Image: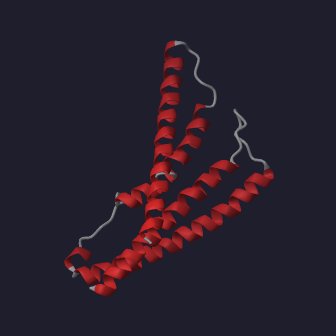
Amino acid sequence: MKKLQKIVNSASWGAALISTGALAVMTMVLVSNVVGRYFFNHPIAGTKELTELAMVCVVFLALAWCAVKGAHISVGVVVERFSPRVQAIVDSITYLAGLGVCIIVVWQTILKAMVVQERGLITFIHSVPHFPFYWVIVAGFIMLCLVMVGHLIQHLVKAVKG
């Protein structure tokens, strides 16, 4: 189990690096657009659509790494008053519910990706196909599901052992 978790964590880290690269590219495009518009009166065509596509990569490829690092927002005002065993039980229920939601998101996004690919939807200015970005969402959520399964198992073990 530890080996699988290490592989998932490494894949999450790799996806987060790609996310960081997409953020850097998005920043460069936006800065170039502003400079081009204000200093040369010549903005970059399609900056908005390129930024939107990059944002998909930035957000969804970083989800799993945030879960690995425990960087998601959580409210523990009530739960932290309980014993460690009860906390583990509550966390297990939370991860199970979150995993259910993630599985539904993966399933529905796969269906949407197939429809978008079949219809051949592209961006207006640069004619970039939409469907690969739906698969980026699927990949990000699958990695998040795997991380959540690992956390769920850890919390279940903690709940059982007390």
* Residue 97, percent from left and from top: 46, 76
Give the quarter of the image for residue 9: bottom left
Q: Quadrant of the N terminus?
A: bottom left
* Residue 66, percent from left and from top: 40, 56
Q: Residue at x 71, y 37 (%)?
A: 124
Give the quarter of the image for residue 158: bottom left
How many marks the image carries: the answer is: 0
Q: Which residue is drawn at 40% across and 71% down?
A: 151
Specify whether 72 is left or right of 26: left
Above or below residue 73? Residue 159 is: below
Q: How is the image coloured?
A: secondary structure
Q: Which residue is drawn at 51% across and 35% down?
A: 26
* Residue 57, percent from left and from top: 54, 46
Give the quarter of the image for residue 86: bottom left
* Residue 28, percent from left and from top: 49, 28
Specify whether 60 is left or right of 110: left
- Residue lying farthest to the top in this orientation: 40
Specify whether 28 is left or right of 49: left
Above or below residue 39? Residue 30 is: below
Q: Which residue is drawn at 27% across and 70% down?
A: 76
Q: In which quarter of the image is the C terminus?
A: bottom left
The foreground one among 8 and 107 is: 8
